[in-house]
Amino acid sequence: MSDLTLWTVILGLGVGTFLFRFSFLALRADAFPEWALRLLRYTPVAVLPGLIAPMVIWPQATGGETDPARLAAAVATAVVGLWTRSVLWGILGGGITLYTLLWALQ
């Protein structure tokens, strides 16, 4: 595949993705029924665990072996996030727990 073909495909996909997403943004919010708007609010909550769970349970850094530092960081993130109701504090709590335990368990 030539470079021109590759860049044409990348740009075409970028324009297509932008137009697809813009079509939803261009619609007014009241164009969707209330039940659809309520379900769309939960999309990030449904997607994030799917992205994070493999990195906690089967991390590549340990060759796929579950380790206590990552499990504790995931629990700390959830607890701090639920306690403070803040994503940023949850991420900060999980990061501090992860790097503290990685340093301590070496």
Image (cartoon, rainbow, N blue to C red):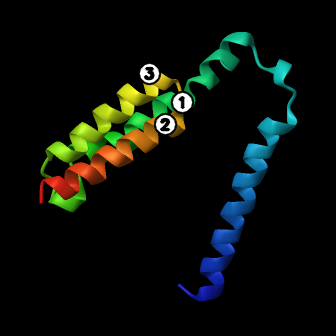
Disc number for residue 89: 2
List x then y, in percent, for residue 95. Answer: 37, 48
- Which secondary structure lies at badge 1? loop
Give the residue displayed 40% in from the left and 43% down from the top: 51
Q: Tell me: residue 75, above or below residue 1.
A: above
* Disc 3 to disc 2, C-alpha distance: 9 Å
* Disc 2 to disc 1, C-alpha distance: 5 Å
Q: On the image, numbered disc 1 is attached to which residue?
A: 86
Give the residue displayed 21% in from the left and 58% down from the top: 103
- Crowding around mark 2 (Cα neighbors within 10 Å: few <14, some 14 to 19, many 20+) is some
**Image-quadrant location for residue 78:** top left
Q: On the image, numbered disc 3 is attached to which residue?
A: 83
Please report contact status of discs 2 and 1: CB closer than 8 Å, yes or no. Answer: yes
List x then y, in percent, for residue 4. Answer: 66, 85
Q: Amino acid at mark 2?
A: Trp
- Crowding around mark 3 (Cα neighbors within 10 Å: few <14, some 14 to 19, many 20+) is few
Disc with the residue nearer the chain's start (3 vs 2):
3
List x then y, in percent, for residue 12. Answer: 71, 66
The one nearer the camera, 16 or 75, is: 75
Q: Amino acid at mark 1?
A: Ser
Q: Amino acid at mark 3?
A: Trp
Please report contact status of discs 1 and 3: CB closer than 8 Å, yes or no. Answer: no
Judged left or right of residue 68, residue 5 is: right
* Disc 1 to disc 3, C-alpha distance: 8 Å
- Which secondary structure lies at badge 3? helix
